[in-house]
Each structure stands twice: as C-alpha cells, then as structure tokens.
Amino acid sequence: MKKFLIFSLAFSSVLFAFSKNPIEIFTNNANLKQANISILVQDAKTDKTLFQHRADKVATPASTMKLVTTATALEIFGADFRFKTLLAYDGQISADSVLTGNLYITGSGDPTLGSSKIGDANFFEDWVKALRTAGIKNIKGKIVAEENIFDRQAANPQWTWQDMGNAYAPGIHSISYMDNTLRVFFETKAVGSTPTILRTEPQVDGMQFYNYLKATNVSTDKGYFYGEPFSLRRTIYGEIPANRAEFSVKTDMPHPANLLVKHFTEKLQKNGFSVKNDSIPASNKKLIYTHLSPPLSEIIAETNKKSNNHYAECLFRLIGTQAGTPATIESSLKIILNYWRTRNLPVSQLFQNDGSGLSPNNAVSAEFFVALLNYMRTKSKYSTEFYQSLAVSGESGTLEPMLRKTVLKGKVHAKSGTLTSVKSYAGYVDYKDKSLIFCVIVNNFHGSSYDVLALVEEFLLNISE
C-alpha cells in the first residue's frame, strides 16, 4: 500500500507538471513574481491565440521598439530606398580649374557615411573624382556642410542623462559620419588610480575631458561619458580595468559634420587641391555628385540584427520628413502612429518616444507587437526583407547566444531588447509544422538579465513542442 501511495503521488506530480501551460511555468517563476509581464503567442497560419498573459497591457520594450521603426521605414520608403548626400558648388569655375565659390555637402540623414558597419569606407575617393570631373582643382571659398533635413534636437529629451554622451546614444544629425563615435584611449595603472587619457580616434580639435574614471578589478568597460550634442566637453565616470597599457572606451562625436568637412579638406589637400576658406557670398548651386547609401534593406538588417541605436534613430527621423523638413521627433511619432492606425493596429497600446528603444518611457503591449509582426508577414510587400533583417537564434546578431544548443537553433527570427530591469523578445518561430508569432516583455524582474533569458528560452521551447 505504501509503495502504491508513493507511486500515485509521483505520477500525480508528473501529470501536474505536464498540465501546466507555458504561461504558468513562466509567470510563476520566483524571479518574476513582482514583474510587469505582457505575453502573446499566435498561430501565424490561423491567427488563433495560443497563449497570452496581460497581452493588451503595456510595458517598456527596450530595443524591441526598433521593430516599429524599421517596419514603418520599410513600408513608407521601400526596401530599395537609399539616402542621398549631395555635393554641389556655387560661383564660377575658371579655365584653370579655380572655383570662385563654395563647395556644399548636403546631408539627408544617412547613418552609413564613413560607418564601420556597412557602406563604402573609401567614399572620399569618389568625391575627389567628382570634383576633378567637374573641372575643380582649387576652391577659393569654403566647404559648407548643410544640415537641414532634421532639426537640431540631436538628443532625444526622453533619454536618460546616463545614456547621452555615450557611443550607444550618439547625437542624431542631418549629416552623420563615422557612426558619430569617438574612441578614447586610456593607460591604466594600479587599482584606485585615475586612468591617463592617451588620445582619441579620430582626433577632434578642442575636445575637453573631465576625467573621474577609476581603475578597478573589473574586466570590461564600465565607463560612462556625460555631455551634450555639439558640446566639446565630456565628463567621464565609472570604472575600467586596471594595469592596462591601453584600453579604449567609446563616446559620441560632438558635431560629426565638422569632422567630415575637416577630413574631406585634408583628403583634397593630399590629392593636390587647395581650399582657401575665403568668405564668398552664396549663390545658385549646381549639383556635381550624389552619394548613395546602401539600400534600406541592408540598413534595417544592421539595425535589427545588431540593435544599432544610431541607425534606428536616423530611420526614425527620416520617417518624420514625410510631414516636411526639418523633421522633428514629434513629426516622426505622428507619422508612425497614423500609419499603423490606418492599418487597424491597436495603436492605443503604443506609447513611443524614440526610434531605438533607449527611452525608459516607451511602452508597448505584446498584442501590438504581434499585430505588427503579423502584418509584416502577411500583408507587407517587404515581408521577406523584414524577416531577413531579424537576428536568428544561435546564429546571428543579438540572438547568437540564444537557444544555441537546442532544437530551436536557427528556427527563431526575432528582435531582442534589454535595459536595466527590462528584457523583451518579439518575432517568429518556424519549427517543424509550427509557425508562431510571439512577444514576451518582462519589466522589473529579480535576478539577472541572463536569468530571464533562460526563462524565455524555456518558454519558447515549451510553446514549440
């Protein structure tokens, strides 16, 4: 009788475990007891809701917000859209190749100009060739950067002070250059000492650093720069590893267009051109060259796979140009909201403040994300490009460490999001005969971000059985 009772209890425990659905297993975890959670899983073939938990309630999505930005940009501009940076001149070109006038670089918000991510790293060669073709060898006037397509509110006011000034939250300008990023090199000595600044790459004239960094036993970069766009002053706090001959930390570039003009001037001079920088009144301009970015499909792939905040924010501002120029944060938000309202998405569950997800004041529901993903899969002309822009579990981008040693390796295409106390995922699961659209947003959890990642992995495996 005793053996039978033990067997019965064990069998009942197994049945109970198998009777619990994936939502219960996930939400009943001790680390998530006080968390704000929004979950929805939908069958992509039938639109049937399979699992949900507070699906229509909003939570901070972090970088999953990039799905809204990239989907909207694709829908409005198309996969083949390319940013254009224009070279033009005014005045007159003499028979001996002297331009009595100015040379103009007109930006359109291209984030890839001089980028280390994608695009042509040697684009100055084509610019120099264009001037030669136009018959220009010497410039009496100035090289002028025209930055009119976006307004000058380079930093989103909804970002935190801790973020602004760092390379992952650079200023957003009509002319971007070199990812709007500087690398500051330090020499560090004993624990507790203040690191010595060696140099910056690239060099920006007039930069001032107020250095309160400490060398400690940390093994990674835990330094933060504080500063405003256009300002040459940066204050540095935090920790970096001790006893390093050289250690670099990235900060944002104060005014990318100025550095672009400087570098282009130097390139021209190395190629035998002269730039006198005389003050010559502006007159009617003549176009001599159009620099094209990579297509939008490649830009959103970098944005979504690598969670590139700079690219996302440039796309976000580009969307605002549909309401006129200079585009503003407000015009971008209005265009996005109206676009998805006319597609019957639940926009009452979308509280967007930026394009990248850096703002902790963003709030979106799992229901909205699933509706967006469903639309992009079933109704968008750019369904393939959008799907291919997403990171792949165990293989690429921010999902490369995820589900790497499971049956779902290569079967999940999704966007992740991480901020302090925020973990979110939204995307597609295509495994065997199942095709699912899912979103999981978790705010204010206990434990580490890695703990929540493990729970999300378990959840995705459970819903895919």
Image (cartoon, rainbow, N blue to C red):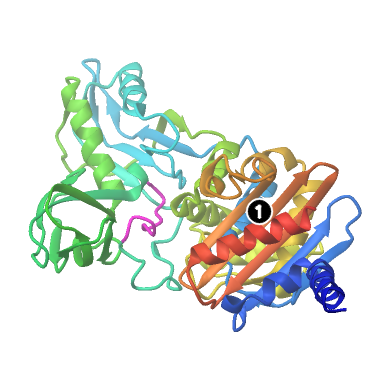
Q: In which quarter of the image is residue 165?
A: bottom left
Q: Is residue 282 left or right of residue 64?
A: left
Quarter of the figure that contains the N terminus:
bottom right
Can see residue 142? Answer: no
Position above or below: 94 against 419: above
Position above or below: 252 against 277: below
Mark 1 closeness class: few <14, some 14–19, many ≥20 residues within 10 Å: many
Magenta part mainly helix, strand or loop? loop
Position above or below: 122 against 20: above
At a point 71% along the width and 67% down the height, the residue shown is 366
Position above or below: 416 against 115: below
x and y percent of residue 333 in the render?
59, 66
Residue interval drawn in magenta: 166-177
Q: Is residue 195 left or right of residue 92?
A: left
The type of residue carrying mark 1 is: Thr
Residue tagged 1 = 72
Residue furthest to the bottom: 34
Circle 1: element type: helix
In magenta segment, residue 150: no
Residue closer to the observer: 138 or 348: 348
